[in-house]
Image (tube, helix red, strand yellow):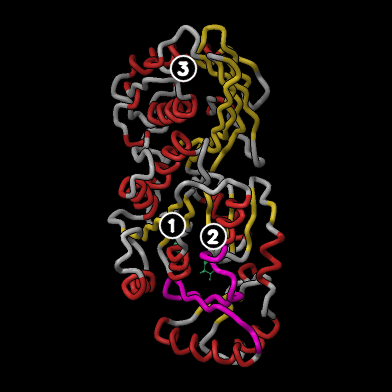
Amino acid sequence: MIVSDLDHTMVDHHDPENLSILRFNALWEAKYRHDSLLVFSTGRSPTLYKQLRKEHPMLTPDITIMSVGTEITYGNAMVPDEGWVDVLNHKWDKKIVIEETSKFSELTLQSETEQRPHKASFYVKKEKAQEVMKKLSESLVKRGLDVKIIYSGGMDLDILPQGAGKGQALAYLHKKLKAEGKLPQNTLACGDSGNDAELFTIPDVYGVMVKNAQEELLQWHAENAKDNSKIIHADERCAAGIIQAIGHFKLGPNTSPRDLPDLLNAKLDRFDPAYEVVKFYLLLERWQRAEIQNPEHYLDYLKAVFSPSGAYINPFGVEQSLHDIIGSIKNCSGDKKGKQYRVWVDQVFPVQIDSDTWFVKFKKSEQTGEGQQCCFTTAILSSKDVKSSQGISWVHVHQTWMDGSTTSDGKNWFL
Ligand code: GLC
Ligand code: MG
């Protein structure tokens, strides 16, 4: 299980190309999705979380923890954990928090979307933070509340119930998963700022503070966890630091298919449909970005993996033969050269339906300068009459537009 913060951890706001998260995505979908849990734990409210998803190539997590561990939701439908809400109501009264904080002129209220039932959030200058936190804490104790005050990013001050926070939310999840017999073998917590510190205090958790971690987190580490060899400060930024930690702690495969320059020739010794789906779309991206050295070799690959009788139903509802698509793909070689064009897949779930056939469903997304487009995709892949070193053959592909996305220019969407 990976439990990762988003801003400046999974998402690098200083990388317009989103390269490190795209590397992580390819690794996760190819190697981990089928048997691991992806948990996002963010300070953002549901509103700002959904906004972030539109702006960056983010995978869909199995569990989403928002508003600094005060809101836990499950699955794509983001079903809230009602049990967690009960825990948070203990010695908490938001009205009193608002009353007391209004007496501090150093505090500026954050936007309305970030004020949540169990979270009150403000901005406060670095120089004032320690003093304000101390006084505020005293006044809230006097009013009978038991709260937690967290300073993050050198500017954000959050007030939460004592039992809340990213760490407590993770402990709660662990307990729940354990009761269901689903406790993961390992947990890797990933963060960059003050509100992530608690994640690293949960028993048996491996931790990575990404290279670009904030001063307040590094200071917390120096004072509280210096000798804990289960926590590292990565020398890579954001999601690249997460990949580094997977390798450092030997938690599983740590080579992203995106990092293989000769992906076309990457040979597997067994059939792996999830890996083949990730590889197929990475190659398509490289083809359109004019990054494939040997075009003939790529076209041969397409001929080999597209079944001669294969059908493709495109998201406009038009059926084509897979072999006809090869011609269209051939013509789009390099058409995204020099552009901000990326392709990624999300929630790749293969189900084996007989000894040599898999039904695979996934979401395929493209990012162009103008935004994201996403298709829900189902495919039938077959290993009949092919060697595992050749890949796997695509027999049938069917796509449907998702999340209101569509493109008026049908010529620009292949698979
Ligand atoms: C996110 C939230 C904000 C919070 C901060 C630190 O930026 O939007 O409300 O204060 O995280 O936890
Ligand atoms: Mg962060």
Q: Nearer the viewer, residue 196 or 173?
A: 173
Amino acid type of the residue tagged 2 in the rendering: Leu
Mark 1 nearby-residue class (10 Å; few <14, some 14–19, many ≥20): some
Q: Residues within 10 Å of mark 3 (few under 14, many from 20)?
A: many
14 shown above or below 395: below
The residue labelled by disc 1 is 205
Q: Which mark is residue 102?
A: none
Q: Is residue 341 visible?
A: no
Q: Which residue range is magenta in the image? A: 144-171
Provide residue 30's location: percent of width, then percent of height: 45, 33
Which residue matches tag 3?
392
Q: Which residue is painted at 49% across and 24% down in the image?
A: 273
Q: Give yes or no for contact between labels 1 and 2 (Cβ–Cβ under 8 Å).
A: yes
Residue sitting at x 59%, y 46%: 181
Q: Looking at the image, is mark 2 or mark 3 earlier in the sequence?
A: 2
Going from the N terminus, do you reach mark 1 or mark 2 first?
2
Question: How far is the residue under mark 1 from the one under mark 2?
Answer: 10 Å
In this rendering, the answer to whether 375 lies above or below 78 is above
What amino acid type should be assigned to the residue bearing mark 1? Val
Tell me where residue 338 appears, x and y as whole percent: 36, 37
User: In the rendered image of this protein, does residue 177 appear above or below residue 291?
Assistant: below
In the displayed structure image, the side of residue 246 where residue 2 appears, left or right: right
Q: Are marks 2 and 3 in contact (CB under 8 Å)?
A: no
- Marks counted in the figure total 3
Is 9 one of the magenta-colored residues?
no
Residue behind mark 2 = 170
Secondary structure, mark 1, is strand
Q: Position of residue 334 (x, y in %)?
A: 38, 27
In depth, the one of 278 and 274 nearer the eye is: 274
* Residue at (56, 27) in percent of width and height: 350
Disc 2, SS: helix
